[in-house]
Amino acid sequence: MATDYARSLQWTKEETDEFLLQNRTVVTAGTASLVSTAASFPFDSVKSRLQVRDYPSIWACAKSVVREEGFRGFFRGVTIPLITISFVRTSSFSIYYNTKAALHRNGIFDDSSRLIHTALSGAAGGATSGIIISCGSAPFELVKVQRQLEYLIAVQKGLVKKNTSANGGGRTFVPQSGFQAAANIYKNFGGIKGFYMGFPLHMARDTFGTALYFGFYDSIRKLVTRHSTSDSISGPSLYGIPGPVVSFLSGSSAGILSWMILYPVDLIKTKVQRDALAGNPKQFTGWQTFMHMIRERPIVQEEGGKQRILKTDTFLARFLRLYRGLGVSALRSFISHGLTWTLIETISGKITERTGQSVSYAPDAKQEE
């Protein structure tokens, strides 16, 4: 009887194929998000620390994390992002595809022969996705930032002395779980509204960032398709470069380009949220933080009590403060977005091979519904 029951739970090939086709976005984007988030999270942790504290280099920041927090510090707060980012990205891709399809059905940006139409339809789908998704993702990202920076926040508030021992001796810092961090934000920062600290910056970053990201990706893939020497179920190849590698480079290029433009907004958002979470009495708005970073000029104390401003402290040097941590962030984007699109295209190809029905995610491709 138990064997008969177990067999009744097994899907036939037709049922499995139908599930894969009907839920292809969940299967592809969900799987890709889980893998890419886990692989890139340590770089995201280092990026957050570089944004709110001066380190001589990326390597110095990484060594500081290991010395003060242990190797686990790189993965502090990873559990919630693994769940939420997978859900958010899957929803984001669904909204992006559906928005583009709706625009094309209504004759808007529907000329696939024109690169500008491809770019604008991708950007419109991305912007729509960013606006909607940011409302739900903001609380989870705030908890992630709190977990990533909780040691630095504890040091800033004087709750723990910086650890100087390689083995963690004398450390009194006890990290929170993600649920504890969320409960503390709810309790100490006004309930639900506390999860939306820095939300205008979060929405601006997600809306414009996602628009640029999908617009860039669709444009890159359109150009690749035009110059492709051959095609496969894993995507078009280019000048002998295999399809999966082309997908990786296309995704990583789109991620890096969009992130370079929006990076200052993300840095300012992180600083605003860090100060709010630390209870800093002198909190700045996003615009005030931007102007402070542009205008602040460090003064050097010389012997005899004289003070002078560094000659190297030019406007360009102050502006580049807005890109502190960009190097590791670009590396994170390279890995995360490259893996995301490689897995999406590869898994889509496997589904096509299994079912015989195309589920290509290339721009303007006709998909089986």
Image (cartoon, rainbow, N blue to C red):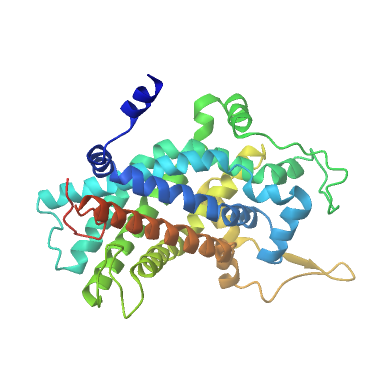
Q: Is residue 101 left or right of residue 331?
A: left
Coordinates of residue 272 in the picture (x, y in percent) = 57, 46
In depth, the one of 232 and 368 nearer the eye is 232
Coordinates of residue 244 in the picture (x, y in percent) = 37, 66
Q: In percent of the image, x 20 and y 68: which residue is there?
A: 115
Asked which quadrant contains residue 215, the reply is: bottom left
Coordinates of residue 225 in the picture (x, y in percent) = 24, 71
Coordinates of residue 181 in the picture (x, y in percent) = 62, 33
Q: Is residue 145 left or right of residue 172?
A: left
In depth, the one of 105 and 303 nearer the eye is 105
The image shows a total of numbered marks equal to 0
Q: Quadrant of the C terminus?
A: top left
Residue 267 appearing in the image: no
Q: In percent of the image, x 54 and y 31: which residue is there?
A: 194
Asked which quadrant contains residue 62, the reply is: bottom right
Q: Quadrant of the N terminus?
A: top left
In this rendering, the answer to whether 139 lies above or below 367 is above
In this rendering, the answer to whether 53 lies above or below 173 is below
